Image: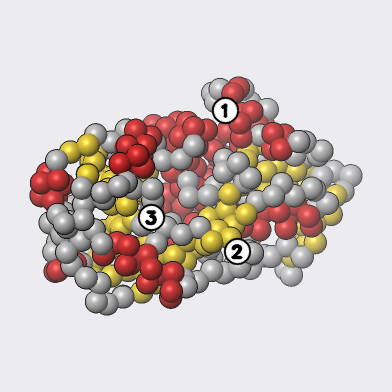
Amino acid sequence: MSADFLIIGGGIAGVSAAARLSHHGQVTLLEAESNLAHHASGRSAALYEPRYGLAPVVELSLASGDFFRASANVLSPRGLMILGRPGEDATFERDIADMHLPEVPFEQARALVPILNPATVSRTALADHAWDIDTDLLLQNFAREAKSNGAQFHLNARASAITKTAKGWRVSTASGDHEAAILINASGAWVDQTAQMAGIKPLGFQPNRRSMARIPAPGGHDVTHWPMMFGCGETWYAKPDAGALIVSPAEEHAMDPHDAWADDMVLAEGLARYEEFVTEPVTKLLSNWAGLRTFSPDRVLVIGPDAADPSFFWLAGQGGYGFQSSPAASQLACDLITRTPPSTSDALIAALSPARFG
């Protein structure tokens, strides 16, 4: 089966790229699992906070704002709160400066989240420029756009071999071979393995596990309008979720690519850190899970053609920013692949290019 563009990976990166490229040619997307967004994309904290991350990530996320605001029902108000303890002033001040959060009196923060502990929380900051992302709706919107333009999505299509051909690339799967002139590597935690399979030099991506626990609403409170809360320095975070609260230890533990699961001890330690800031103890877990957040060596996304073979395109290293940066990241990828002048600055293109790794 032949196409113009062949994408490996059915997470938000691959699916959004498929939507953009489907306006320019025939797209084939291969997903190894039985459903889209099985790994990191299906385990996201689902927040659009455009000031979160390093400068190139922030620029991509801010550039995605117009798309989000024009997409019905994809965003809903959430807000963001940063909490600090005595002795954490420098970290607290750095965090609120980076994310443009004004400091507010403790009582103002506690009026929103009544379980905050006055004995341990010394400083609070709050802003409303953070929104929940309906990640399933966003993903399905992109998938629907791609398929309406004739894109072919193949599930259970794990690549077993990748071969360079005279016309581009051939990817072999259990159900058959697929060919295209351009190969887009959007395979998440497996991006370096995909590159090696294609004979392309890996760039040094590192998957890191992050765990999550879902707990009942603390103290029976209605958490619907609570903001997302971070311990400064991102030592934990908590976010309302369908009447409950999801709490993460916010760990980054290096892992080989795999279908991740939460570590009980890591969860316990993270929940203990969260409990220091609140007056309601955790007495029950409703569920838990983990995902792999994959970073490049400099923790910035990689978007661009491989330096040695421009027909191999990197769309990788989304880390924890995949959903919130996906509108601008996918548009940039499409522009570079189709040689359309991008609206993105030259400096940002260079900051995202795989060529930066030599």
Which amino acid type corresponds to the residue marked 3 in the rendered image? Thr
User: How has the structure been colored for display?
Assistant: secondary structure
Question: Closer to the N terminus: mark 3 or mark 2?
Answer: 3
- Give the numbered dot on residue 140: none
Residue 345 picture location, percent across and down: 56, 22
Disc sitting over residue 348 in the figure: 1
Tell me what residue is drawn at x 16 percent, y 56 percent: 119
User: What is the C-alpha distance between the residues marked 1 and 2?
Assistant: 29 Å
Task: Say the numbered circle drawn on residue 255.
Answer: 2
Q: Position of residue 118 (x, y in %)?
A: 14, 54
Name the mark on residue 235: 3
Q: Which numbered disc flags the more N-terminal residue, 1 or 3?
A: 3
| Label 3: how many Cα within 10 Å (few below 14, some 14–19, many 20+) | some
Q: Residue at image x 12%, y 44%?
A: 108
Q: Residue at x 46, y 71 (%)?
A: 262
Q: How many marks?
A: 3
Can you give x and y, in whole percent of width and height, for residue 23 in the image?
59, 37
User: In which quadrant is the N terminus drawn?
Assistant: bottom right
Query: Split into 4 quadrants, where in the image is the C terminus?
Result: top right
Badge 1 amino acid: Leu
Q: Can you say whether 144 is above or below 154 in the image?
A: above
